Amino acid sequence: MNRLIKAASKVEVDPEAMEKLLVNRSDFLHALENDIKPAFGTSGEVLEHFLARGIINWGTPVSSILEDGMLFIQQARATDTSGLVSVLLEGPPNSGKTALAAQLAKNSDFPFVKVCTPEEMVGFTESAKCLQIRKVFDDAYRSQLSCILVDNIERLLDYGSIGPRYSNLTLQALLVLLKKEPPKGRKLLILCTSSRRQVLEDMEMLSAFTAVVHVPNLSQPDHLMAVLEESDVFTKKDLSALSRKIHGHRVFIGIKKLLALIDMARQTEEPYRVIKFLSKLEEEGGLDMGSSIQ
C-alpha cells in the first residue's frame, strides 16, 4: 500500500494508484520475509538463541550426551519403531540442558522443529496454556518427521517450591501428549528439560519418557580448564597460573554460570583478571579452595 501514497507537502493518494494496485512477485517476497510467520518448519531463531554461545565440549559427559542424542534421533527415524521417542534432559540449574536439547533438535534435521517455552505463555490461563501446547503437538503430527523441544517443564506446570503448588490441568495434558503415539507413518521426537527431577518423579512424569539423561555440572579442574582454554579470555601465562591454583581442589559449577564469570573477567583489566575470576568463582561456590580431591 505504500506505493499508493504520493510523497508531497501533505499526504495524498497517487492519482495513478490504480495502475500500481496490481500485486506482483516482489510484494509476495516482501511479505514472506517480513510479515508472515510460518506455522510449520523449524523454530530457527529460537534454536539459534539457545545456541548463541555454541556447545563447549568440556569433557566426557557432554560427548556422551551428544552421542546418546544421535541414537535417540536414529531411533525416532527408524521405520520399525512406534514412532515416538521422548527424552528428558535433567540436571542442576545452569548446567546447559537447554543448549544441549537445542543442539540435538538441530542435529535431527527434521523438517518440523518447534520449541515450547514458559516465556511464550506468560499470563496464559491453565486452559489457554493447554490449548497452546496441544496445538504444537497437533501441528507436529502433520509432518512425517517432527521434533518438539519443551523447555523448563516445571515452569510450564507453574510449579512453586513454596506450597508447593502446580497446575494439575497442564500436568495431565502433558502426560497424555508425552505418551500419545503419532499417527501411522509419522515420527515424533520430544526433548524436554528440567532442573527438578525429584518433583517430576513425585508427579509420576518420569515414566512417561523413553529415556532420562542427566546433564551434570563441571566437577573436575580439567573440565574448568577446557572451558577457559576455549574462551580466549586468558593468556597462556594466565591459564598456567589458573591451572596451578585450582589443581587438586573441588570444582562444581554449571557451564552457564561459568560463562557468565568468564564474561565478567573479560571486562577486568588484564593484570587483575586471574585474581578477580578466582575470587568470583569461590563466591559462587564453584571452587572450594579449602578442600582437595582425594
Image (spheres, grey):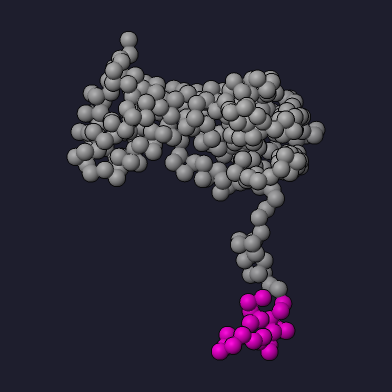
The image position of residue 177, as x and y in percent, is 74, 32
Q: Position of residue 249 (x, y in %)?
A: 30, 18
- Evaluate whether residue 276 shows in this view: yes
What residue is drawn where x is 69% and y is 84%?
A: 17
Quadrant (top left, top right, bottom left, bottom right) of the C terminus: top left
Residue 36 belongs to the span the image colors magenta: no
Percent of width and height locating residue 100: 52, 33
- Residue at x-position 73% and y-position 25%: 81
Question: How many numbered marks have been drawn onto this rendered protein structure?
Answer: 0
Residue 205: name its quadrant.
top right
Residue in view at x 55 percent, y 43 percent: 47
The residue lying toward the viewer, choosing from 137 and 182, is 137
| Magenta span | 1-22
- Horizontal and vertical percent for residue 26? 63, 70
- Is residue 276 toward the left or the right of residue 166 in the image? left
In-front residue for pair 191/275: 275
Q: Is residue 115 left or right of residue 230?
A: right
- Examine the image and state in which quarter residue 105 appears: top right
Residue occupying the far front of the picture: 163
Q: Is residue 19 magenta?
A: yes
Q: Is residue 53 left or right of residue 105?
A: left
Residue 190 visible (yes or no): no
Residue sitting farthest toward the top: 294
Above or below, 12 relative to 156: below
Q: Quadrant of residue 231?
A: top left
In this rendering, is residue 98 above or below 204? Answer: below
Residue at the (51%, 36%) spot, across then down: 99
